[in-house]
Amino acid sequence: MSEVLTAPLVVEFPFTRSLGPVQSAFLTGLRERTVLGVTASDGRVVVPPTEYDPVTAEEVRDLVEVGSAGTVTTWAWNPSPRRGQPLATPFAWVLVRLDGADTALLHALDAPGPEAVRTGMRVRIRWAARRTGAITDIACFEPYDSPAGDAERAPHDGEFADPVTGITAPARLDYTYAPGRAQSRYLRALADHKTIGERCPSCRKVYVPPRGACPTCGVATDTQVEVGPRGTVTTFCIVNIKAKNLDIEVPYVYAHIALDGADLALHARIGGIPYDRVRMGLRVEPVWSEDGRFPDHYRPTGEPDADYDSYKELI
């Protein structure tokens, strides 16, 4: 039995959002080493502040300044920090109720080991040397040998010079993808410039890329069938937004292509033709990547367009 393929993959995109008055004041305050909360309808001071009351869902604006020291309410040890986490050495995730607040803030605690962390311990904010108006302006918490003081809270108007009005947070997922036996066979065949699908023993349809089971009948598919390499454009879209790290000039076309002999259309980029001349029924063939491992795109074959009735069931 052939080995199942695996590959490391990364999904990453920047998440950009504008800030309302509450979140703007909170993040700008961090830049100025000031922690703000908001007073809810039940009198509690919520930190980090929410834009809407957690009880009534009404908009809230009553900002309150709280202390920079607090008490750990619960924690968990992180022995193996990952990329992008607050500290590069082992640390504790902690919920800290800052002096003057009634809710807890999640952040990292710099501690030598789990034996140095406990619920109820006192900690304080370690501010980042360079602050930009983000939660990372709190570099982490650190142990603080001081008893809990009186509630430190004072009304705050939320006004700062040069307020932060928006943030961009990178979202990233690192994972290992295992395509399974059926798709591993499919990928290996591509390296030989062959495209294989699998036929359902019940409905007799050929699926490309193969999935190991028929999505209609729910039975295993284990008979390999070579299809293509030519096919027919069944439908398509014109891409006008350039993707990061993708060296393709816009506009370009992505299409669903029904390969000859297949009963399921796959998607691929269309090249070798102006984007505004791509059409349903266009006959295309693969152009292989420089390393020959997969089709880089599909181009017109020069054949007459396929009749609509020949591919209408695959749209």
Image (tube, grey):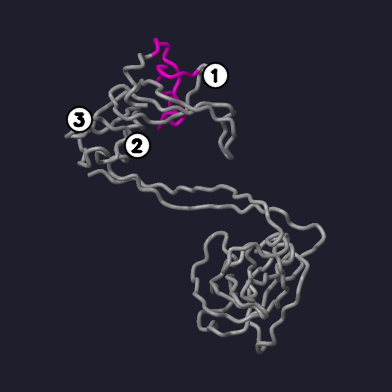
**Residue named by callout 1:** 276
Q: Can residue 286 be found in the magenta stretch?
A: yes
Between 254 and 166, the residue placed more toward the observer is 166
Numbered circle sitting on residue 204: 3
Disc 1 is placed on an element classified as helix
Q: Looking at the rendering, in which quadrant would you find the C terminus? A: top left
Q: Position of residue 255 (x, y in %)?
A: 45, 27
Between 161 and 267, the residue placed more toward the observer is 161
Q: Would you identify the image quadrant in which residue 25 lies?
A: bottom right
Numbered circle sitting on residue 187: 2
Three-letter amino acid code of the residue under disc 2 = Leu
Residue, x 34% and y 44% (percent of image)? 179
Three-letter amino acid code of the residue under disc 1 = Asp
Dot 2, how many residues are within 10 Å of its Cα: few (below 14), some (14-19), or many (20+)? many
Disc 3 is placed on an element classified as loop
Numbered circle sitting on residue 13: none
Three-letter amino acid code of the residue under disc 3 = Arg
Say whether marks 3 and 1 touch (CB < 8 Å).
no
Chain part drawn in magenta: 278-305
Q: Position of residue 154 (x, y in %)?
A: 75, 77
Marks 3/1: CA distance? 36 Å
Residue, x 26% and y 41% (percent of image)? 212
Point out the frontmost of discs 1 and 2: 1
